Image: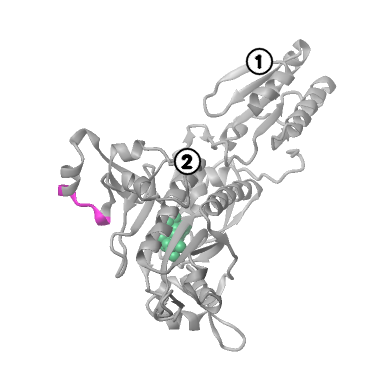
Amino acid sequence: MRLSRYFMPTLREAPSDAQIVSHQLMLRAGLIRQEAAGIYAWLPLGLKVLKKIEQIVREEMNRAGAVEVLMPTLQLADLWRESGRYDDYGEEMLRIKDRHERDLLYGPTAEEVITDIFRAYVKSYKDLPKNLYNIQWKFRDERRPRFGVMRGREFLMKDAYSFDMDEAAARRSYNRMFLAYLNTYARLGLKAIPVRAETGPIGGDLSHEFIILAETGESQVFAHRDLVEMGAPGPDIDWDGDLQPLVDQRTRLYAASDEMHDQARFEAEAPQDKRMTARGIEVGHIFYFGEKYSKPMKAVVAGPDGVERPVQMGSYGVGVSRLVGAIIEASHDENGIIWPDSVAPFGAAVVNLRVGEPAVDEVAERAYRALTAAGIDALLDDRDERPGAKFASLGVPWQLIVGPKGVAEGVVEIKRRATGERQTLPLEAAVKAITA
Ligand code: 5CA
């Protein structure tokens, strides 16, 4: 992409109501624009990051055996009357009437819609297990939308729903999601801690929140350090095998958010030097809730004995748009964003220090083409302006800098955003170092 043709409306200063660093940087780097409280337009740079996160989430869901669908943003109130949630949901629900005076709502989540889809087609245990997910915009009329995309009113969520015949099978589905989440966050460059979470009326101990550590987080976490240090299981686990040991290895170590925290247990289960207390951001939440929706909505399946039973369900959410902010909270310095390679909006930026000088322009152009040919999504700064600190704050992992002195000597400079490390190399070697 040539910067002269691109749309990257950066701001010198973030508006004063942006309280946390991710919100400030997202506005300054031109990732988002607020259209109304908690409602944002995604500008090109922000959209690229959002799409990359979405794609990683999708790949990890698919790997774990989930199947993508796309449900509408608008839902019928009647479905929520069937589950009994329409009146309970309260003011967070945006209620809409169409021209026929029919009650609609902008979905804050989709348990009812997916249950409706499921019950229309699936009647037998032979068709189970199933896990269906979508990545779709949600609306919750939060009382206090704040921190930019972290607590928005309109936000992008990945929500998956599992369907099983009995509790043991439902637990296997839950385990898949539990491990898929750890792999997802690891690919996003994040260390996510699964913590025990509030389950509501149904569901035993089967609910976890996934929290990444950040000082500005809204959640307080208490965790055994060994859990924080434990890596993700990796993609090559046997998804059809017994995943329980991998889950147990993690859930037997103490981890809880403030609502579930029990100080006496924490002290009993973790030695003092292993006790970590920190603030964090909830980037995912998984639940097992059994028959909560299938029973009232009559989503039943016949077992091998021919008897129909309500299907056992769980739901699994990832805050896709929140993750853009969360990644920035976890990865920035005084100069701005440091994107992990996996979600960076561009792989490299070519900076031309002397636009208009033919020899320099020519090398910059060649560098841009070479990076593009090597499969790097590159940005060419071809504007006749001082590059300044702007590029650093954008967080692009590599800069390839072309100046008159280097051109005369047959070299360019590359700079790694994360470390500040610089190297002077001939162009071919520079491209190689960036692609490596
Ligand atoms: N139905 C379940 C799981 S599919 C559900 O809605 N879970 S949730 O309420 O916990 O939301 C899932 C994830 O969405 C949260 O972990 C959080 O990362 C994200 N999220 C929730 N509310 C907001 C919001 N107002 N702004 C941005 N992200 C949000």
Within 10 angstroms of label 2, few (less than 14), some, or many (20 or more) residues? few
Residue 6 x %, y %: 73, 44
Compared with residue 61, is residue 118 higher up or lower down, i.e. above or below?
below
Q: Is residue 172 left or right of residue 42?
A: left
Q: Which quarter of the picture shows residue 288?
A: bottom left
For the point 62% across and 86% down, the residue is 99
Q: Is residue 223 left or right of residue 49?
A: left
* Residue in front for this viewpoint, 60 or 392: 60
For the point 65% across and 26% down, the residue is 434
For the point 53% across and 35% down, the residue is 338
Task: Identify the magenta region.
Answer: 259-264
Q: Which mark is residue 234?
A: 2
Return the disc, 2 or 1, that comes first in the chain's sequence: 2
Q: Give the quadrant of the N terminus.
A: top right
Residue 47 x %, y %: 62, 50
Q: Amino acid at mark 1?
A: Thr
Q: Give the quadrant of the C terminus.
A: top right
* Residue in front for this viewpoint, 131 or 273: 131
